[in-house]
Amino acid sequence: MKPRISILLAALWWGSLSALGFLVVPLLFVHLPSPAAAGAMAAKLFTAQTWLSIACTFFLLLFLRSKEASAPTQQAQAAMKFVVAGLFLAVLVEFGVSPRIVNARAEGGNLKLWHGLGSVMYVAQWLAAGWTLWCLSRFEKAPETG
C-alpha cells in the first residue's frame, strides 16, 4: 500500500509543478489585463505550489524511510536524494529567491537575474519530482527461482 501512496504523492508533486509552471502561469500572462496583475497572481499560485511541494516531499520522505527501514528498496534509495533536493529547491525559491524578486520589482533591482534564477530552480525542482516519480514507478524484476 505504501509504495502506491508514494507513487501517488510523487505524481501529485510532479503533475502540479507541470500544470502550474507550464500551463497555468503562461495562461495568466496571456489572459489577464496586465503583466503586473498576472505576476501578482502567479506569485500567489507559486506560494501555494511551494506548500503543496513541501507536503508531498514530507510525506514521501516519511513513506520512503518507513517502507522497510532495515532494507529500503532500490527505488526508494534512488528517489530519496531527489525528494530532498526538490524540497530544498522549493524552500529556497520561496524564502530566498521570491522575496528578492519582490524587492527587485519594487526597488528597481535586478529583476531579470532573480526571475531567471527562480525559473531555473523551478525547472530543477520539476526534474527532481519527475525523476522521483520515475524511480518510484519502475517495476523490479521478480527474483528468479529454481
Image (tube, grey):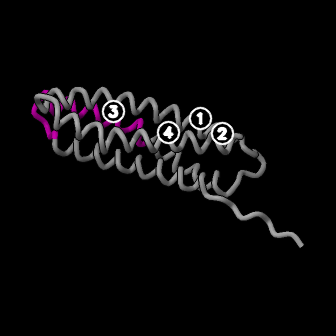
Q: Amino acid at mark 1?
A: Phe
Q: Amino acid at mark 4?
A: Leu
In space, the residues marked 1 and 4 are separated at their CA atoms by: 12 Å
In space, the residues marked 3 and 1 are separated at their CA atoms by: 20 Å
Mark 3 or mark 1: whose residue is earlier in sequence = 3
Which of the 4 image quadrants contains residue 27? Answer: top left
Range of magenta residues = 89-111
Label 4 or label 3, whichever lies nearer to me, is 4
Asked if labels 1 and 2 touch by Cβ distance under 8 angstroms, the answer is: yes
- Would you name the residue on which mark 1 appears? 59
Instruction: State which quarter of the image contains the C terminus.
Output: bottom right
Residue at 29% across, 43% down: 118
Query: Is disc 2 surrounded by few (<14), some (14 to 19) or many (20+) residues within 10 Å?
Result: some
Q: Secondary structure at mark 4?
A: helix
* Label of residue 63 in the image: 2
Query: Is disc 1 surrounded by few (<14), some (14 to 19) or many (20+) residues within 10 Å?
Result: some
Q: Vertical placement of 132 versus 63: above or below? A: below
* Label of residue 12 in the image: 4
